[in-house]
Amino acid sequence: MRIKISLIPANSHRPSSPAITPKPPPPTHFPKCPPMSPFTDLTTPSHPAAPHQSRRRKTNFKIGNLRLSPNILRRVHLRAIAPSRSLLPTQTPSPYFQTKPPNPHQTPKTHTPSTLTHKRTHSQPQQHPIDHFPTPAYLYSSAALSRKTIMPTASPCAIVIFGASGDLAQRKLIPALYEMAREKLLSDHAYIVGFARSPMSDEQYRKESYDAVMKFARTKPVDETILKSLINRLHYFQGDYGSTDVHQKLSETLTAYDDQYGNNEKNRLFYLSTPPSTFEPIITCLGQRAMDPKTNPQSRFKRLIIEKPFGTDLATAKALNALIHKYFDENQVFRIDHYLGKETVQNLMVMRFANSIFEPIWNYKYIDHVQITVSESLGVGSRGGYYDKSGATRDMIQNHIFQLMALVAMEPPAALDAISIRDEKTKVYKSVRPIRPEQVDSYTVRGQYTAGEWAGQKSAGYLKEKDVPADSRTETFAALKLYIDNWRWSGMPFYIRTGKFLEQKLSEVVVRFRSPPQTLFQKQCESPVYPNDLVIKIAPEEGISWRLNGKVPGGTMNIKSVALDFLYKTAFKVEAPEAYERLIYDAMTGDQTLFIRGDEAEAAWAVIDPIEQGWRESKRLPDPYAPGSWGPKRSLDLIEHDGRRWMQSKDGESEPIVACSL
Ligand code: BG6
């Protein structure tokens, strides 16, 4: 878990001379604070102190054993993105963690040794490593206060990427490791071994990786010194994923590199960026060799990152979990969903739980419905082979979209730790009202794109794509209407849709509030006054937009929907890190908050399975839709028959000015 500290200029809150500061008038009332939330635990007292009460309130601020005076708090604004476990209330371990006796090689409970080097340049010597996450005493030392953010360099480790020559490794993983090296988050003693089946020399692999960083790095121009230093720590390892002999050789090779690069703790991070069919042989061989407690018994950590898809249904996800748990403890396993690494997705929790305005209205009483759209403007391109076995629902809904839905719908977690947050998300999936196979035609729509050209890509139609069978019924578009049967969301629909070759690339969550009661404007306007929307923009724009009603200037009382926008790029003026940078770093530091827990993946599949079954049994074929449209007509009907409409849809008119005769 990680805490960021940002400094608020001391003098922006503190008068330069107390003598000339007018005494504030005694307050007539004090604003109410949100209830204790995971954020308020760490940053604020449960009730705000009136200025004249600050002396009495002083003792209310506590982190661990450290008492913090309001003066310090005024200068330091703690941004608790992922707090240290030591700062959190002790949690009862979820039963999910009690499936196996403790393994001596499991992830240590505390943070791994880290070096606080965020502001250090490469040439400076490393500072003394600290064994745990910075203590409160450290956080408030002058050294810490002089930093804008604290992100300790992760411990040295061997990073083994299975599927090294694949697209993901070259486009995302190696560039992410470069960015981490640039930000001093990757240890100079970490090294990378790319493992794949095709033969390649170290030199070729280094050249490919160099080119990949030059092309895909998030920050340009690329710092050649840092890149070369990283490239020099890159090796290629060729072999059969399912051979224990090869894995034995891999283990020996890693031990030799440990000495060469100074990975004294023999830490291991295995990244499975391979097709799902290879998971079983790789995990088995890792379990029998590198993960065997007898191999490098002194290793501080050995962890596994697994790319999606995690299974293809509930049964396969369970089988995969069972295989993993044969060799790994759950706290060594990092099931990745890159959506959770996106800043805007993480901001969903901050928005909900660090702002008191939302909680009272965040339920079916005030919200009419939630709609989630994750659309892409390109077709499947060359990925037909993979995609046809997956389809839009397994590829996007079971993971990315469900994560968005869970973050919108979940209850406030008891704390910001991996157990509490993942417990709450799992409860959301378990509360989804099942769509029975015979109900799929009423609650779901699936589609397939036809021939056409859009966004510079031409296609003869999905059924003609490379590696796609001509009679495929795989959906390239899916829309669902779901209900979450709990007290908060009772009877309120969540509409979700995703697809390839749609009008635009867009990921957004729209929370549409109920209309104002039928009074005042409603009575006198020609058409109903539009309800408010909270639009959470994930991509390509990143931010939040509140749509409110405003009076159009002029003599008549005309009303128009206007937006209050918060956009990341203008509000913070910093570029957000790529999802993979954050996620690889978290895996290295042992923070599982932004990864999917095994039972969470299973609960999500339990929602999808009956839908897939219904589609298999249904006589209805996927509805055709043209590239560049918003999907099949039935997906518009799915929501419009309920008297609602998608926020983005070509056929829907934009909301006009509402004319009122007052
Ligand atoms: C991947 C899917 O997980 O997410 C792809 O397999 C999809 O089919 C991609 O294109 C979308 O990710 P993003 O971050 O571009 O929205």
Image (spheres, grey):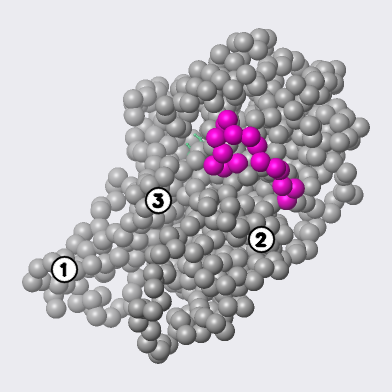
Which amino acid type corresponds to the residue marked 2 in the rendered image? Answer: Ala
Asked whether mark 3 lies closer than 8 Å to ligand 1, one says: no
Nearer to me, 444 or 545 = 545
Q: Which residues are magenta?
A: 117-132
Q: Are marks 3 and 1 in contact (CB under 8 Å)?
A: no
Residue occupying the point 58% across, 30% down: 123
Q: How far apart are the alpha carbons under marks 3 and 1?
A: 35 Å
Amino acid type, label 3: Phe
Which quadrant of the rendered structure holds the C terminus? Answer: bottom left
Dot 3: element:
loop
- Residue 397 x/y as whole percent: 55, 45
Q: Is residue 624 left or right of residue 204?
A: left
Closer to us: 189 or 249: 189
Q: Earlier in the sequence, mark 1 or mark 2?
A: 2
The residue tagged 3 is 572
Report the magenta stretch's main SS: loop
| Amino acid type, label 1 | Asn
Secondary structure type for disc 1: strand
The residue carrying pointer 1 sits among few (fewer than 14), some (14 to 19) or many (20 or more) residues within 10 Å by Cα, namely some
Mark 1 to mark 2 CA distance (whole Å): 58 Å
